[in-house]
Image (tube, helix red, strand yellow):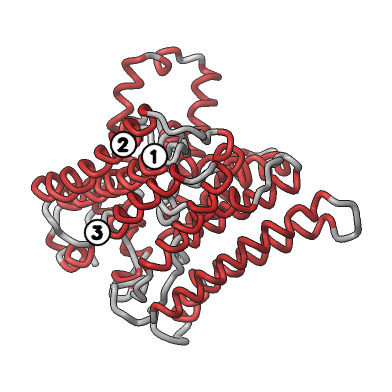
Amino acid sequence: MTQPWFWIMLGCTFAAFWAAPLRLRLSILTAASLAFIFLILDGTDANDGKPLISATAQRLAMIAMVGWALAFYFLAPLAKKEGPGKKWTVLLLILGIVGFLAWFKYVPVITARFGAGPMRFFIPLGISYFTFKLIHYALEVGRGTIKDRSLDAFLSYVFLFPAFTAGPIERFDHYLAARETRLSKEAIAEGLSRIIVGLVKFLVIAQMVMVLIFGQRTMVELLYDFNTLGAWDVWKFMIAAYLQMYLGFSAYTDLAIGASRLFGLKIAENFNWPIFASNITEFWKRWHMSLANWCMTYIYMPTLGKWRNPYIASYLTFIIMGIWHAGALPWIAWGLYHATGLAAYQWWGKYRRQKKWQFFNGAAWKYACIPITFLVITGSFAFTEMQPSTTESYGGTMDSLRLLGKMLFLPVTR
């Protein structure tokens, strides 16, 4: 989204969108989104940017994604009709799109793990967000909560180019309800100011200030020097990783929200200063909020309703969330880490209520917990930084655990 093509497409689409009659605007936005996505596909693989997969293969995968979107649009309404196949329609659609996601994102990792080939593969652009949007759409159409089902609105929602690659995971009903049909000075001012905030956050703070403060050490370099590093060196690296992830990801969200605002759209917020959360529950109300809300609605609450156990619901939710991020053991371990943190906090909250300890409800304790929560969340980046390029040469989850041990000042070596 920081490439010249994005700004050219944004400017041209903005002009065409508002010059067109109202009935054609979402179709123009859809066409521009698909054109932009096809334009930026360059055939690089998901690991190191080398041209392993042709751009043609990626575009064929994108055509398949368009086919899946059309299938969901036309088949999901069948779930509302009476008949023997009613209850299976949504289930088959969900199984199909999850299988499509798994084919690109998880099968290559599994086959590589068992020696069936090198761990080099490509992942279609935006496929994870695309999958969750379609699942949301199918479930809500099946429940009858989505009334407006125009094809142009649906396709513009699924392929909206400012938000396609990095979210947020917008709800279709919110996407339509928050749409404005007249261009206003307020919308332009809000959109441009949000874009500026995103650019400053990404280009200045994340790319320049953070580098000056923390340097540019990579995970490979950290693991290579592991035995000679002190705990503070590992903490410094992990804090930098956390802040870089937050700044970069939230900057892309700023750009997506700002660019969408120029089309009269108010898409969902995704971050609310999570680095200032005072506990892990609050953190997940502030970090990647659209993903957290999606998982709360479609995983946590149904699991809680079935099993009546918040701990089971938390663990299942975060395991699925980890798998959604990547088909790698470090990400599953990341999910277990956060689920354990939430379970511990839930238990602690219940225990202190039983003891009627009012001190822990005060402002002083809340502010004291902000740095504690920050450090707890920082620990999870020992798992998220273990990307495929490093796990090919290093121990993946085991090295993550060694890093955590080092952060706890234990005498850990490799």
The residue drawn where x is 35% and y is 82% is 52
The residue drawn where x is 29% and y is 69% is 390
Residue that label 3 marks: 412
* Three-letter code for the amino acid on which mark 2 is drawn: Arg
Q: Give the image quarter of residue 365.
A: top left
Mark toward the viewer: 2 or 3: 2
Closer to the camera in the image, 393 or 405: 393
Q: Give the image quarter of residue 189.
A: top left
Q: Is residue 182 left or right of residue 210?
A: right
Q: Secondary structure at mark 3?
A: loop
> Is 361 drawn above or below residue 233 in the view shown?
above
Residue that label 2 marks: 194
> Is 42 drawn above or below residue 70 in the view shown?
below
Mark toward the viewer: 2 or 1: 1
Mark 2 nearby-residue class (10 Å; few <14, some 14–19, many ≥20):
many
Q: How far is the residue under mark 3 from the one under mark 1?
A: 52 Å
How many marks overall? Answer: 3
Location of the N terminus (image quadrant): bottom left
- How far from the left and from the top, in percent, is residue 125? 43, 64
- Which of disc 1 and disc 2 is earlier in sequence? 2
Q: How far is the residue under mark 2 from the one under mark 1?
A: 10 Å
Mark 1 nearby-residue class (10 Å; few <14, some 14–19, many ≥20):
many
Q: Which residue is farthest bottom?
A: 116
Mark 3 nearby-residue class (10 Å; few <14, some 14–19, many ≥20):
some
Q: Does the image show residue 332? A: no
Residue that label 1 marks: 262
Closer to the camera in the image, 208 or 65: 65
The residue drawn where x is 47% and y is 87% is 116
